Image (cartoon, helix red, strand yellow):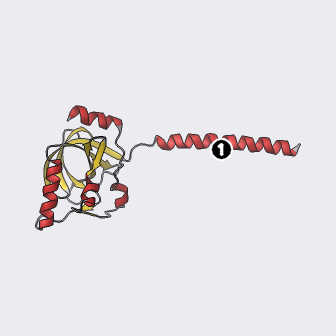
Amino acid sequence: MFTVLRRRHANVYFLISAVLLILSAYVLDQRPPAYYYSVARVLRVVDGDTAWVRGVYGYRAGIDFKVRFAAINAPELDTPEGVLAARELNRLLYGRCVVVAVPKSDVRDKYGRTIGVVLLPVAGGFLNVNYSLVRRGLARAVDYGVPPEVLLRQDIYVPEWIRDAISHRC
């Protein structure tokens, strides 16, 4: 008698555990994005890790703002390496539409620049420009409070509504 009851309880516990596991996977997959997103046009490259952009859609739409590329530091413009980094960034971004992913904390640096990850639309997805600059040796990864490995990833999530907006509004 007790063996039958234990088996029934074990089956019930197993079933409840399975349902909870499936529900938790669904809930975790539906988490809100960790960023505010702005579809923006690059107006001017300031140096190897800063650019002026105009918000076109989403976060800061209709506003010109300065973006400091998160988790990287490029050499200063008074060095040949700094000039090269700025030139390459200008070649890559000037006049193009990008997605600026700003961490939900909306961090600004001491100069009032918005700290963000810049994503450039490319065939089949987005290029993380911050990550690309580090990978190409034009900047170095720096921990400014958020570990670089969090922001310097190629697979930063971009919502579908932003993907649609960049193809229709820029």
Image quadrant containing the C terminus: top left
Residue 169 in percent (x, y) is at 22, 33
Q: How crowded is mark 1: few (under 14 residues within 10 Å), some or many (20 or more)?
A: few
* Whether residue 2 is situated above or below residue 144 in the rendered picture: above
Tell which of 156 and 143 is nearer to you: 156
Number of labels in the image equals 1
User: What residue sits right under mark 1 in the picture?
Assistant: 17
| Residue 146 visible to an observer of this rendering | no
Residue 114 in percent (x, y) is at 24, 52
Q: Which residue lies furthest to the front in this view?
A: 123
* Whether residue 147 is situated above or below residue 106 in the rendered picture: below
| Residue 48 visible to an observer of this rendering | yes
Image quadrant containing the N terminus: top right
Q: Which amino acid does label 1 sit on?
A: Ser
Quadrant in the rendering for residue 24? top right
Quadrant in the rendering for residue 19? top right
Q: Residue furthest bottom?
A: 79
Residue 34 in percent (x, y) is at 38, 47
Residue located at (59% from left, 44% from top):
21
Residue located at (53% from left, 43% from top):
25
Residue 127 in percent (x, y) is at 28, 48
Quadrant in the rendering for residue 97? top left
Q: Residue furthest right?
A: 1
Residue located at (26% from left, 55% from top):
132
Tell which of 103 and 162 is nearer to you: 162
User: What secondary structure is found at the residue carrying circle 1?
Assistant: helix
Tell which of 163 and 137 is nearer to you: 137
